[in-house]
Image (cartoon, rainbow, N blue to C red):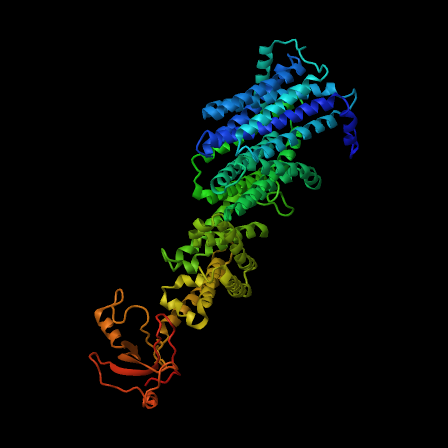
């Protein structure tokens, strides 16, 4: 094929000959396939049953995909022994008979004939396409560019099948019989066009038919063996099959949700076909451009990761627009992946077995789509659609990471610098960091092991300190901090699903600088100045990260290290000086000091000094909390006013003793002031809406008076100046506070 548009310029003179007749018949035949397939889907899913279910969709996918793939390798053997023109005409007329029989399915209301019709229809279509491919070289002039001729035929057939399915989906939901009638008309027109072809060969094969079929079976097994034994062929094909499986699951989910929740004029199956068709066309166009800018192997993992992001966003707030956009993004990424994999397999497979490899590739390619539908049969529930989408996102993400690890692409490609630890061992250390990072979470309720606040971060610090490089240390620190966030916020998983991983990754990244700073200071030369800097700077960085994490938009101050001492009065007393931040600073400093003492290959004096610093910090905090005088509460300047809004006046509240209810009816309360028990009586003060009574200003100016000591040594006080609201639940205004003596 010539470069640029020159190749396509040759299409016009080619179409002036018999190629136009062949392509016209192909367009009519594949357009009829689109109409018939969408009509059969309507009959199987809705007319002949109660509605779309995963099992019904799986059966439809089985009969629409597998026959096309299973018959393909054997169709060439058959058509070489018959006249190709007669084969295309006969099979086209046979398809007319099939669609006429399909009209009887609508009358009998039975699914079995519908499935048989789909199998026979698509199997026969494979014979027509195989005969067309074999006859095409006979329809162009000698020496013509066959690549251009095949491109014209492929584009025309793809567009005809796509438009047939999309246009048919607009009216088969109302009149399925109309879809069969249009399909039969297209097949009849295709047979008429094929009859006008000149002789295009066929019928000259000397070998018997049975021997040819046996040979095809042996070659197909050889192709599967090559796929299983050659890594450069196996890995790209596994990538396609895995992505195809997850794409099939998303396809089924869209069909189910569209048909169950939204009253669409077109069936959900047609909508899903339209979305995937448009996205596949866009991916086909974009794949050569991306392959020109990036390495071909490097494009495979991003196809998974883009699909994971699309499924994740679609599951966060499931809607028809979000599902359509998500499925379109996944189908686009899959088509890019498939085009790149086709090129990789063509380069990697030996020319002797390349055809057999692609035959096996085609079979397993469609089997993955069917298996996806089977996997959703026990999992589908209408209320769990967002969970299914999140599981798909997790599958895409894990598949992309495993593929990148296998192909040694980003983020697993080798970097210049010191040789890292072997791959499996490195990931075992990182998994250990994820577990050890969650250890401080045990200091919070439950089980409230508050002593872990002093040493819970030490194992993670030691693991990070033992990293062979700064990059590996950053990985371990990040995973450890993410493990801490996961352990403290696991209860959010039912609400936000996989977004919990993003939350842990984002908030955990805030703690990475403090851990790396501690590593750089405790692993350097063992000097007193570095020890002091480690005990001061690293805890300050930790507290700064906690302060940023306590932003109200991120949920407020939750799971702070200092909050782990909530039940230790001697340590919690520091909060009176610097709040919870001072307690976190103390605990982080002790953890860093203990880690500095346990770092390997340190002199004993340095270890002793680090342990001494840790002991002094703990002893000082405990001494302050134990020896400081208890704060004496001062008498407030005024008592809160008493409002009688809400329940019926005088009625006991839930759980309230009868004596308190009686006191509330009398307008009295029992309060403790300065260590003594007082009975306080609240009196109303006149507001703007009440007339001022005579003598009230003098009474308001007087001091509360004593009325003797009630039983228990208390005083009975009368507090004036509070105004009761007329409406229940309204705020009660207080006058200017006065000293209570």
Q: Nearer the viewer, residue 186 or 131?
A: 186
* Labels in figure, total: 0
Is any atom of residue 370 visible in this view? no
Determine the residue positioned at 62% across, 38% down. 278
Q: Nearer the viewer, residue 506 or 86?
A: 86
Q: Is residue 312 above or below residue 353?
A: below
Which quadrant does the C terminus fall into?
bottom left
Q: Position of residue 139 (x, y in %)?
A: 74, 20
Q: Could you tell whether 616 is left or right of 676 in the image?
A: right
Q: Position of residue 298 (x, y in %)?
A: 64, 40
The picture quadrant where one finds residue 401 is top right
Q: Position of residue 709 (x, y in %)?
A: 22, 83
Determine the residue positioned at 52% across, 24% down. 103
The picture quadrant where one finds residue 590 is bottom left
Is any atom of residue 62 visible in this view? yes
Q: Nearer the viewer, residue 553 or 653?
A: 653
The picture quadrant where one finds residue 638 is bottom left
Q: Is residue 269 above or below residue 95?
A: below
Q: Position of residue 243 (x, y in %)?
A: 56, 36
Q: Could you tell whether 496 is left or right of 130 in the image?
A: left
Q: Nearer the viewer, residue 611 or 47?
A: 47
Which quadrant does the N terminus fall into?
top right
Q: Is residue 364 above or below residue 217?
A: below
Q: Is residue 623 above or below residue 434?
A: below
């Amino acid at each position: 094929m010539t470069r640029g548009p020159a190749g396509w310029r040759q299409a016009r003179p080619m179409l002036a000959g018999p190629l136009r007749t062949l392509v016209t018949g192909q367009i009519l035949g594949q357009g009829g396939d689109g109409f018939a397939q969408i009509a059969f889907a309507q009959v199987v899913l809705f007319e002949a049953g109660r509605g779309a279910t995963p099992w019904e969709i799986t059966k439809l996918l089985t009969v629409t995909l597998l026959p096309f793939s299973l018959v393909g390798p054997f169709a060439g053997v058959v058509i070489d022994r018959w006249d190709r023109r007669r084969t295309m005409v006969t099979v086209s007329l046979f398809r007319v008979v099939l669609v006429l029989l399909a009209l009887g399915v609508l009358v009998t209301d039975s699914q079995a004939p519908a499935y048989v019709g789909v199998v026979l229809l698509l199997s026969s279509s494979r014979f027509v396409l195989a005969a067309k491919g074999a006859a095409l070289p006979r329809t162009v002039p000698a020496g013509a560019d066959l690549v251009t001729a095949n491109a014209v035929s492929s584009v025309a057939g793809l567009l005809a099948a796509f438009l047939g399915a999309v246009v048919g989906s607009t009216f088969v939901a109302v009149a399925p019989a109309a879809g069969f009638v249009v399909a039969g008309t297209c097949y009849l027109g295709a047979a008429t066009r094929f009859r006008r072809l000149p002789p295009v060969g066929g019928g000259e094969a000397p070998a018997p038919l049975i021997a040819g079929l046996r040979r095809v079976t042996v070659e197909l097994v050889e192709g599967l063996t090559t796929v299983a034994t050659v890594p450069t062929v196996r890995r790209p094909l596994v990538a396609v099959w895995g992505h195809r499986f997850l794409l099939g699951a998303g396809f089924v989910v869209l069909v189910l949700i569209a048909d169950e929740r939204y009253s669409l004029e077109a069936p959900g199956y047609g909508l899903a076909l339209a979305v995937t068709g448009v996205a596949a066309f866009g991916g086909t166009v974009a794949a050569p451009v991306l392959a020109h800018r990036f390495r071909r192997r490097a494009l495979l993992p991003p196809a998974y990761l883009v699909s994971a992001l699309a499924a994740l966003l679609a599951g966060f707030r499931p809607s028809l627009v979000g599902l359509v956009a998500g499925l379109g993004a996944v189908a686009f990424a899959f088509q890019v992946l498939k085009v790149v994999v086709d090129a990789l397999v063509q380069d990697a497979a030996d020319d002797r077995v390349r055809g057999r490899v692609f035959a096996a590739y085609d079979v397993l390619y469609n089997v993955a789509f069917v298996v996806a539908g089977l996997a959703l049969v026990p999992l589908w529930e209408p209320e769990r659609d967002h969970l299914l989408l999140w599981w798909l996102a997790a599958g895409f993400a894990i598949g992309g990471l495993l593929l990148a690890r296998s192909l040694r692409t980003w983020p697993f490609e080798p970097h210049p610098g010191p040789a890292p630890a072997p791959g499996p061992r490195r990931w075992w250390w990182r998994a250990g960091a994820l577990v050890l990072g969650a250890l401080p979470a045990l200091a919070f309720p439950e089980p409230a092991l508050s002593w872990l606040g002093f040493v819970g971060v030490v194992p993670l610090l030691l693991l990070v300190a033992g990293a062979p490089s700064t990059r590996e240390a950053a990985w371990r620190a990040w995973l450890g901090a993410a493990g801490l966030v996961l352990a403290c916020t696991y209860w959010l998983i039912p609400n936000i699903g996989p977004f919990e991983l993003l939350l842990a990754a984002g908030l955990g990244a805030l703690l990475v600088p403090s851990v790396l700073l501690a590593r750089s200071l405790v692993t350097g030369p063992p000097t007193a100045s570095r020890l002091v800097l480690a005990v001061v700077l690293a805890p300050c960085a930790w507290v700064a990260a906690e302060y940023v994490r306590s932003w109200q938009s991120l949920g407020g101050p939750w799971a702070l290290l200092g909050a782990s001492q909530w039940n230790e009065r001697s340590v919690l007393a520091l909060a009176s000086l610097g709040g919870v931040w001072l307690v976190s600073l103390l605990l982080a400093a002790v953890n860093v000091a203990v880690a500095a003492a346990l770092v390997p290959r340190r002199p004993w004096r340095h270890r002793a000094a680090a342990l001494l610093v840790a002991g002094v910090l703990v002893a000082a905090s405990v001494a302050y909390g134990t020896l400081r005088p208890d704060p004496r509460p001062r008498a407030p300047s005024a008592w809160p006013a008493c409002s009688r809004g809400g329940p019926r006046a005088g009625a006991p509240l839930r759980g309230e003793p009868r004596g308190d209810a009686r006191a509330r009816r009398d307008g009295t309360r029992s309060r403790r002031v300065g260590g003594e028990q007082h009975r306080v009586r609240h009196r109303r003060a006149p507001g703007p809406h009440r007339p001022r009574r005579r003598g009230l200003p003098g009474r308001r100016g007087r001091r509360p008076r004593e009325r003797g000591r009630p039983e228990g040594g208390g005083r009975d006080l009368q507090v004036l100046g509070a105004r009761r609201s007329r409406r229940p639940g309204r705020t009660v205004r207080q006058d200017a506070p006065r000293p209570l003596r």
